[in-house]
Image (tube, rainbow, N blue to C red):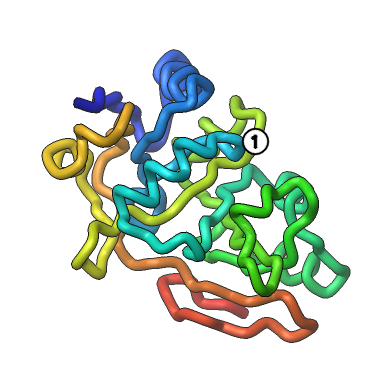
Amino acid sequence: MARIVEIHPDNPQERLIKQVVDRLNQRGVIAYPTESGYALGCLLDNKEGAERIRQIRRLPDDHDFTLMCRDLKNLGEYAKVGNSQFRYLKTHIPGPFTFILPATKEVPRRLQNPKRKTIGLRVSPNRIVQALLEHLPTPLMSVSLILPGEEMAMTDAWLIQDEIGHALDLIVDGGYSGHEPTTVIDLTDEEPVILRQGQGEPA
């Protein structure tokens, strides 16, 4: 059964953040809070972890993962960002948005959209997420924690433990998280295209 680590949502405790980071570095799979519900995550090179996440969510092989990045510079390492995209991103991150961009060679092919060679990327304002990413060597490979048959992401750490704790290594309890999904914006062309309207209001 996954261990629950309770971390303060506004002032994340350094020693607890390091415990979560250690578990991720040991090829662990975690559930963690974001501003749009809980997510499942593991490190970018954790192929086995990605497969475990697919099994938990019952995802098809072609389902896109999202890379949870630390900041705009970090995002730019994994996505090809032109001048117009850069200006747009700069005004929208951090925030409740997922951006679809062409992937760089730093992104494993197994994570890219097989037809378009794109990847979804996020920069979350959640302080626990930011604290974790400051200590990690790569972005978190991530998907929303939406159980099969459900439409909304889970929002409570203890309920997550009850439902899927046997399939996880660690659950970060950061208190109640929002449940409205992010707005998904395709930035592969010059003009942004909204693929899903969520809580973010794009300018």
- Say if 62 sits above or below 48 in the image: below
Q: Residue at x 45, y 80 (%)?
A: 197
Q: Between residues 117 and 136, which one lies in front from this camera angle?
A: 117
Q: Residue at x 44, y 13 (%)?
A: 15
Instruction: Residue type at mark 1: give it.
Output: Thr
| Secondary structure type for disc 1 | loop
Taking 80 as reference, is 11 left or right? left
The local crowd at label 1, few if under 14, some if 14 to 19, many if 20 or more residues have their Cα within 10 Å, is some
* Furthest-top residue in this view: 15
Taking 103 as reference, is 97 left or right? left
Label tally:
1
Q: Residue 156, percent across and down?
A: 20, 45
- Say if 21 sits above or below 147 in the image: above
Q: Residue 45, percent across and down?
A: 61, 36
Q: Between residues 72 and 140, which one lies in front from this camera angle?
A: 140
What residue is pinned by disc 1? 138
Q: Residue at x 59, y 62 (%)?
A: 120
Q: Residue 164, percent across and down?
A: 20, 41
Q: Quadrant of the N terminus?
A: top left
Residue 98, picture quadrant: bottom right
Taking 46 as reference, is 191 left or right? right
Q: Residue at x 52, y 51 (%)?
A: 124
Q: Quadrant of the C terminus?
A: bottom right
- Say if 165 sits above or below 26 in the image: below
Q: Residue 201, percent across and down?
A: 51, 77
Residue 99, picture quadrant: bottom right
